[in-house]
Amino acid sequence: MNNQIQQYDFHDSAVRIHTDGDTVEYCARDIAGTLGYANPNDAIRRHCKGIVKRYPLETAGGMQEMAFIGEGDVYRLIVSSQLPAATEFEHWLFDEVLPSIRKHGGYMAGQETMSPEQMLAASMRWLESRIAEQQGQINAQQAQLDAQAPKVLFADAVSTSKRCILVGELAKILRQNGVDMGEKRLFAWLREHGYLMKRNGIPNYPTQRSMDLKLFEIKETPIVHSDGHTTLSITTKVTPKGQQYFIQKFLGHKENTK
């Protein structure tokens, strides 16, 4: 069963038509605009008496639900139109477009004078252009999704994080989001850019700047050795705020990481 919305051009005006089996409906705003009504919405309210159906359509203002009307309401709009070309439009719509849709599933301008071979060639060109157009839209959408994917993945990984993580874990998250960064390289980058430093023999201790920004926390773990003496193990961990901060550096502003 055919169930689709197609666009047909009458001179410089576009008319969208919805077909579902033997049922044919017309975009009310397209009809009113083509017939020269200065206020299409008002014309539709005043002249259309039938049941209006609505379908989502992409418009200049974004996705909107557009009203579609039956043949009776199209005739009412034509009769009430002051446009000199209203009769020509009626002939085009009901004597050319509609019979062709019901017979062939579509309409091409000038098809009345085409031979069967010309009709076939024109149909193939139209089909190829539609496929190319749809593929272009798919490629553009995929490119947009690919560009957004790293940030989306990180948002999923970090937005719900309420715990501090090791620097190695941060490197793993970055790697999963397309940043070529291992644990050692990340430590080196943090030291080079003034986030970590060597202090009291500890090679990766947060700088005062990092602590003021609350990017890291220090975890101290006492270790009791076999001879009875105790030492402290110092571990630098990245806070949830630090995770968000560094991902903006690497995914939002990659040039800052070089």
Image: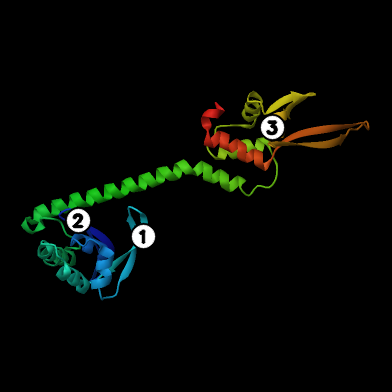
Spot the residue most to the right: 228
Q: Against 134, is 171 above or below?
A: above
Q: What residue type is labelled 1?
A: Gln
- Of 5 and 55, which appears nearest the observer? 55
Q: What residue type is labelled 3?
A: Ser
SS at mark 3 in the image? helix
The residue carrying mark 1 is: 64
Q: Do the residues labelled 2 and 1 touch (CB within 8 Å)?
A: no
Residue 80, horizontal then vertical, whole percent: 17, 70
Q: Do the residues labelled 3 and 2 touch (CB within 8 Å)?
A: no
SS at mark 1 in the image? strand
Give the distance between the C-alpha atoms of the residues marked 2 and 1, in whole angstroms. Answer: 19 Å
Label annotation for residue 16:
none
SS at mark 2 in the image? strand
* Direction from residue 149 to residue 92 in the image, left or right: left
Earlier residue among tags 3 and 2? 2
Earlier residue among tags 1 and 3? 1
Give the distance between the C-alpha atoms of the residues marked 3 and 2, in whole angstroms. Answer: 62 Å
Give the distance between the C-alpha atoms of the residues marked 1 and 3, in whole angstroms. Answer: 49 Å
Label annotation for residue 13:
2
Earlier residue among tags 2 and 1? 2
Does residue 19 appear anywhere in the picture?
Answer: no
- Of 131 and 18, which appears nearest the observer? 18
Label annotation for residue 210:
3
Residue 145, horizontal then vertical, whole percent: 44, 45
Quarter where residue 75 is shown: bottom left
Quarter where residue 87 is shown: bottom left
* Coloring basis for residues: rainbow
